[in-house]
Image: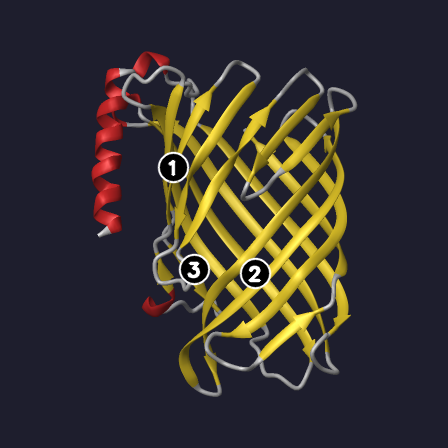
């Protein structure tokens, strides 16, 4: 039901985009962007047992921003993610978790309401413990958020993420984006809050946070398929971002990974992992 309501809203937004096409901020030509990172958390002890575990995470995203029917701005992103779990515990968890999907979103003026925009996104994805995905690991997360542009420096955001098939289906979207000057920028949103300070035209310093909040994966356990595994982790850190040339940007960050839990749904098998330092290397190419 939620999905069909979302489709109707998306159709209405397409009509709104046609009415207010002149005010849409869309690129004259398609913009391609590729971003990849590797994140490593060394072995840390299991707090509720005698084992230990390390985590290696790798992700890749390729996105294309373009204008479509009636100048509707659309951003299409193909993403994959790998979470490798090297464990020495008395529990039996998968060696790795995988995610692969396509994210499609658009942001348009909201039916003529002054300074108000609506962002809609759909992210059909597979969540599994293998790259050989099955239909049972397929989900279609949705999101909708209102954006109020207070002025050229400040924007407010409020909305909702919906994850069908997950135990925790709803997550709020709240925050603001504030750029008081040409050096300092606050992007305080629920998915990836960060603060950036420009040291120069090419180099930035930043602090940020990221979170997996009981993200669910469809796994196989003891030859039993379709067993749900929940993964939780919050990362808080900072680093440096440097523009190598007009196309390539690289960043290095370090920080602390906290509130780390791996567990099977409706099962006593739970690993609480001690907090640990992480290191992340990221590359971004924009054409």
Indicate the position of residue 231 as horizontal and vertical percent values.
55, 65
Foreground mark, 1 or 2, reads 1
Label 2 crowd (10 A; few <14 / some 14-19 / many >=20): many
Q: Nearer the viewer, residue 86 or 150?
A: 150
Q: Which mark is residue 168?
A: 3
Q: CA distance from mark 1 to mark 2?
A: 23 Å
Q: Residue at x 41, y 21 (%)?
A: 26
Q: Nearer the viewer, residue 32 or 198?
A: 198
Marks 2 and 3 in Cβ contact (< 8 Å):
no
Foreground mark, 3 or 1, reads 3
Q: Is residue 21 above or below residue 42?
A: above
Label 3 crowd (10 A; few <14 / some 14-19 / many >=20): few
Q: CA distance from mark 2 to mark 3?
A: 22 Å
Question: In the picture provided, is 150 more to the left or to the right than 93?
Answer: left
Q: State which quarter of the image contains the C terminus.
A: top right
Question: In the picture provided, is 59 more to the left or to the right than 203?
Answer: left
Indicate the position of residue 222 as horizontal and vertical percent values.
48, 87
Q: Is residue 208 above or below residue 187?
A: below
Quadrant of residue 238 in the image?
Answer: top right
Identify the residue under disc 2.
82
Identify the residue under disc 1.
105
Provide the secondary structure element on which disc 3 rests: loop
Foreground mark, 2 or 3, reads 3
């Amino acid at each position: 039901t939620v999905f069909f309501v979302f489709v109707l809203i998306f159709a209405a937004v397409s009509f709104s985009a046609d009415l207010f096409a002149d005010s849409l901020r869309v690129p004259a030509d398609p913009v391609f962007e590729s971003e990849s990172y590797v994140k490593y958390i060394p072995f840390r002890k299991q707090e509720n047992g005698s084992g230990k575990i390390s985590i290696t995470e790798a992700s890749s995203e390729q996105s294309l921003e373009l204008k479509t029917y009636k100048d509707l701005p659309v951003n299409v992103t193909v993403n994959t993610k790998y979470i490798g779990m090297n464990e020495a515990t008395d529990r039996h968890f998968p060696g790795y978790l995988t995610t692969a999907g396509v994210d499609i979103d658009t942001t348009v003026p909201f039916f003529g309401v002054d300074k108000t925009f609506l962002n809609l996104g759909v992210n059909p994805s597979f969540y599994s413990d293998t790259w050989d995905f099955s239909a049972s690991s397929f989900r279609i997360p949705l999101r909708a958020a209102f954006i109020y542009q207070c002025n050229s420096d400040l924007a407010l955001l409020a909305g909702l993420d919906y994850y069908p098939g997950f135990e925790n289906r709803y997550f709020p979207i709240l925050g603001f984006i504030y750029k008081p000057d040409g050096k300092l920028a606050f992007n305080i949103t629920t998915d990836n809050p960060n603060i950036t300070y420009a040291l120069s035209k090419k180099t930035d310093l930043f602090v940020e946070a990221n979170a997996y909040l009981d993200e669910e994966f469809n796994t196989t356990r003891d030859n039993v398929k379709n067993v749900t595994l929940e993964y939780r982790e919050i990362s808080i850190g900072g680093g440096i971002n440097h523009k190598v040339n007009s196309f390539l940007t690289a960043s290095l960050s370090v920080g602390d990974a906290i509130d780390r839990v791996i567990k099977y749904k409706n099962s006593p098998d739970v690993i609480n992992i001690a907090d640990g330092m992480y290191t992340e290397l990221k590359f971004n190419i924009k054409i």
